[in-house]
Image (cartoon, rainbow, N blue to C red):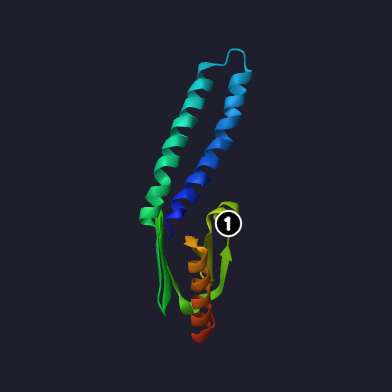
């Protein structure tokens, strides 16, 4: 993981909570005598949003890990609920890279490894672009050299 992934997750959390907070604030300011529960909701949204934005990104960074070997791709992700995934190379069907607006701004990428698993694809978030590029090349060549039908 790139240390810049902490900033990415902070930005994502801040946008999420701002989308919730700003409309509440506008309604609160437009009402002549807002009820007490509206103020309580506004304060709760602000406090929970600030705590989440301050804690979650660094916590995720401490948990998130990934590794590739000639046999498999391993990932550990999450923060409150953590998930350990193993994708055997012989089951890999596609390897993709995606970059959202914040990732582009920070020079980060997400590598998605799709397998024949019902659990869905394995995602490795918060990689520097160059690391992601090399990982995709490595997994592609390893997958092509591995016998199996990826099912």
Give the residue pinned by disc 1: 104
Q: Quadrant of the N terminus?
A: bottom left
Establish if 9 lies above or below 95: above
Residue 109 coordinates in the image, percent (x, y): 53, 61
Residue 11 coordinates in the image, percent (x, y): 51, 45
Establish if 108 lies above or below 87: above
Query: Which of the pair 90/73 is nearer the observer?
Result: 73
Under circle 1, the secondary element is: helix
Q: Farthest left residue?
A: 62
Query: Which of the pair 126/27 is nearer the observer?
Result: 126
Query: Which of the pair 24/86 is nearer the observer?
Result: 24
Is residue 118 shown to the viewer in this render?
no
What residue is rendered at 58% in x and 37% in y?
19
Is residue 69 shown left or right of residue 112? left
What residue is rendered at 49% in x and 31% in y?
45
Establish if 64 lies above or below 59: below
Establish if 12 lies above or below 141: above
What residue is rendered at 58% in x and 31% in y?
22
Characterize the local packing of mark 1: few (<14), some (14-19) or many (20 or more) Cα atoms within 10 angstroms.
few
Is residue 55 shown left or right of residue 143? left
């Amino acid at each position: 993981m790139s240390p810049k992934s902490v900033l990415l997750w902070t930005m994502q959390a801040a946008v999420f909570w701002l989308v919730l907070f700003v409309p509440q604030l506008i309604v609160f300011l437009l009402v002549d005598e807002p009820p007490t529960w509206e103020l309580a909701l506004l304060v709760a949204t602000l406090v929970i949003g600030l705590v989440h934005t301050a804690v979650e990104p660094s916590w995720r960074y401490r948990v998130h890990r990934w590794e590739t070997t000639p046999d498999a791709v391993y990932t550990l992700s999450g923060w409150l609920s953590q998930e350990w995934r193993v994708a055997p190379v012989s089951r890999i069907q596609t390897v993709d890279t995606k970059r959202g607006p914040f990732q582009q701004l920070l020079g980060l990428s997400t590598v998605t490894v799709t397998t024949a698993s019902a659990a869905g694809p394995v995602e490795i978030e918060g990689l520097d672009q160059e690391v992601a590029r090399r990982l995709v090349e490595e997994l592609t060549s390893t997958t092509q050299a591995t016998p199996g039908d990826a099912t």
